Image (cartoon, grey):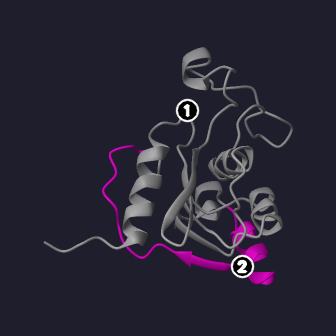
Amino acid sequence: MERPDFEDIFMELAVNLAKRSHCIKRHVGAVLVKDTRIISIGYNGPPSGTHNCDEEFPEEGCSRDSKGSCSLALHAEQNAILYAVKNKATVEGSTLFVTLAPCLPCARIIYSMGIEKVIYLYSYAEYKGLPSDEGLDFLRKFGIGVQKYPKQLMKDDPLIG
């Protein structure tokens, strides 16, 4: 039997974490790793202790801010980074595996935290109908490694991709 490589393990974990999301629009998972060890994990959703969108607002989802984003939700990348920091883990020099390429605000956080590389499964621009992935463009401009995950993964959740 062939042993899976770590990139496959981490991206498959990100896909599985995305399935935990309560968002009715999109499910996103993230895994933060350093030296083949998991530092932190996250998925998109409201902060712990608040409501779950699919339970409280099953038809329309949570309320939206002026830009159309969920007013309470944290992105998967934000949750992974915040959990790492909360638990005093060092994220500098780490790699982030994420099912959806980071938006521009998340890219700024990724850069500011010293994360060295982002490996993503799906394009944020394609999801949002934008001409380019602004978050990825930002990361590349400032020297952060960016890589599209090269393999297709089996997914049974249509909100992931």
Name the quarter where the N terminus is drawn. Answer: bottom left
- In the rendered structure, the answer to whether residue 5 lies left or right of residue 32 reads left
Q: Which residue extends farthest left?
A: 1
Query: Tag on residue 24?
Result: 1
> Residue at horizontal 59%, vertical 62%?
126
Q: Distance between the residues labelled 2 and 1?
A: 31 Å
Residue 2: horizontal and vertical position, in percent? 18, 74
Question: Which one is closest to the eye, mark 2 or mark 1?
Answer: 2
- In the rendered structure, the answer to whether residue 49 lies left or right of residue 7 reads right
**Residue 148 within the magenta-colored segment of the rendering:** yes
**Residue 19 within the magenta-colored segment of the rendering:** no
Considering only vertical position in the picture, is 150 above or below 24? Answer: below
Considering only vertical position in the picture, is 52 above or below 125? Answer: above
Residue 155: horizontal and vertical position, in percent? 34, 51
* Mark 1 neighbour density, 10 Å: few (under 14) some (14–19) many (20 or more): some
Q: Which residue extends farthest front?
A: 88
Query: Tag on residue 110?
Result: none
The residue that disc 2 covers is: 144
> Which of 135/127 is in front?
135
* Mark 2 neighbour density, 10 Å: few (under 14) some (14–19) many (20 or more): many
Q: Which residue extends farthest right?
A: 66
Residue 25: horizontal and vertical position, in percent? 57, 38
| Tag 2: amino acid | Ile
Secondary structure at numbered mark 1: loop
Secondary structure at numbered mark 2: loop
Give the magenta part as a residue range. Answer: 130-158
